[in-house]
Image: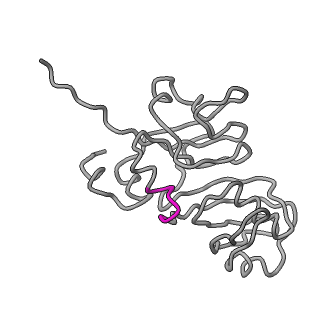
Amino acid sequence: GRALRLPEPLYLMLHKPTGLLSATTDGQQATVLSLLPEALAARVHLVGRLDKDTSGLLLLTDDGDWSHRITAPHSRCPKVYLADLAEPLTGDAESRLGRGLLLRSEQRPTRPAHLQRLDANRVRITIDEGRYHQVRRMFAALGNRVVALHRESIGGLSLDPSLDPGQWRPLSVRERAAVLPVTHSNARESD
C-alpha cells in the first residue's frame, strides 16, 4: 500500500587516471568502476571510453538516452584532448587533420579535426567521433607518437580542475545540459 519512487538518474564526472580500463568489468585488470562505491558502480555505465593509458574526463550514468545522445555517431559531440608528442609536428599537420586522415585498417577517413599547437611537442586536438584509439592513430598517421593523452572536455563540459585523478562527483543540471542540449526527459531535474 506504499507508493514507490524510482531513484533519480545518476550523472557523474570522473577524473580517470592512467592505468585503469574503461570497462564495467574485467577479469584481469582494474576498471574505473573500482573508484566508485560498490552500490554506485553497480548502477552506472560509461559514456564512451578512454584507453588504459589516457587520463581525463569520463562520464558515467544510468540514463541510457542521455548516454546515447552523447555517443551516437550522428551527435558529433566534440571531445578535446591535450596530447604530448614524441616529436615536433610537421608543418602541414593542421591541414591534414582538417581534411581527415585515412587510418590503417579503415575504409573511410576520419572526420575533420581541429589542431592547436601549444608548443613544439604539445597540442590540443578536437575530434567529434570516437574510433578505436583514434587520437593516437591519427598522430601515428602523421608519423608521430603520442606519449601522454588527457581528455579535457566533452561537448561544452570541461573536467573540473578541483578533481584529482581518481576522484569523481555528480554533475549539476547545468553541466548535464552543457554536454548536449537539455531534452524533455531531463529538463525536470534540479540541482
> Magenta stretch mostly in which secondary structure?
helix
Judging depth in this view, the residue of 183 and 156 nearest the camera is 183
* Magenta part of the chain: 69-75
Judging depth in this view, the residue of 141 and 59 nearest the camera is 141
Which image quarter holds the N terminus? Answer: top left
In the displayed structure image, the side of residue 4 where residue 97 appears, left or right: right
Q: Residue at horizontal 42%, vertical 42%?
A: 11
Q: Quadrant of residue 191?
A: top left
Residue 58 image position (x, y, % from top left): 56, 46
Q: Quadrant of residue 140?
A: bottom right
Q: Residue furthest front?
A: 107
Residue 145 image position (x, y, % from top left): 84, 60
Residue 88 image position (x, y, % from top left): 85, 69
In the displayed structure image, the side of residue 9 where residue 42 appears, left or right: right
In the displayed structure image, the side of residue 9 where residue 75 appears, left or right: right
Residue 94 image position (x, y, % from top left): 72, 78
Does the magenta run of residues contain 124?
Answer: no
| Colour scheme | one colour
Q: Residue at horizontal 60%, vertical 40%?
A: 164
